[in-house]
Amino acid sequence: MREYQLTVLLDPGLEPSLLKQEKETVIGMVKVAASGDPHVEDWGVKRVAYAIEREREAAYLNFRFQADPGKIQEMETSLRLRDRVRRFMVSRLDPAMRIPPPATPGESGKVEEAATDTAGQA
């Protein structure tokens, strides 16, 4: 079992309902490949560095999950066949350099409050 990060760029020109449906389809593909629940981040529509099929923006999805290498190949094949997926990149994360998933917004506020409390006491 290895840890992976997947970034997917979707066609931003879709109607909101179709874009939501495509995001759910990609999330379902990742859930099938992953062992356990993947960490999903919807980064929204952002400008890309270069035009992809004459589009200057793309809808980004980012995933962190654990999976077997064979499942990754199947998922990549499925993503290549999706017309609305503009680009994707799968990266294997090095176990020695494992970075914990980002904290949820509620958790980060607690960390900041604790840091200010200890700073005031010193």
Image: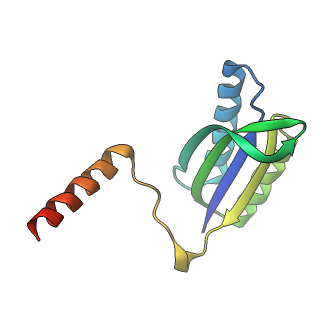
For the residue pair 118 and 69, the one nearer the viewer reads as 118
On the image, the x and y values in percent for residue 99 come to: 49, 67
What residue occupies the far bottom of the structure in this picture? 96
Compared to 46, does 15 lie above or below?
Answer: above
Q: Is residue 37 left or right of residue 27?
A: left
For the residue pair 27 and 34, the one nearer the viewer reads as 27
* Residue at the image point whose x is 64% and y is 33% from the top: 24
* Residue at the image point whose x is 78% and y is 26% from the top: 13
Q: Quadrant of the C terminus?
A: bottom left
Q: Please tell me in which quadrant of the rendered image residue 14 appears.
A: top right
Q: Please tell me in which quadrant of the rendered image residue 102 appears.
A: bottom left
Compared to 121, does 34 lie above or below?
Answer: above
On the image, the x and y values in percent for residue 53 come to: 90, 38
On the image, the x and y values in percent for residue 64 come to: 57, 56
* Residue at the image point whose x is 69% and y is 43% from the top: 29
Compared to 18, does 83 lie above or below?
Answer: below
* Residue at the image point whose x is 23% and y is 61% from the top: 115
Q: Quadrant of the N terminus?
A: bottom right
Q: Is residue 110 left or right of residue 62?
A: left
Q: Is residue 48 left or right of residue 94?
A: right
On the image, the x and y values in percent for residue 47 come to: 72, 41
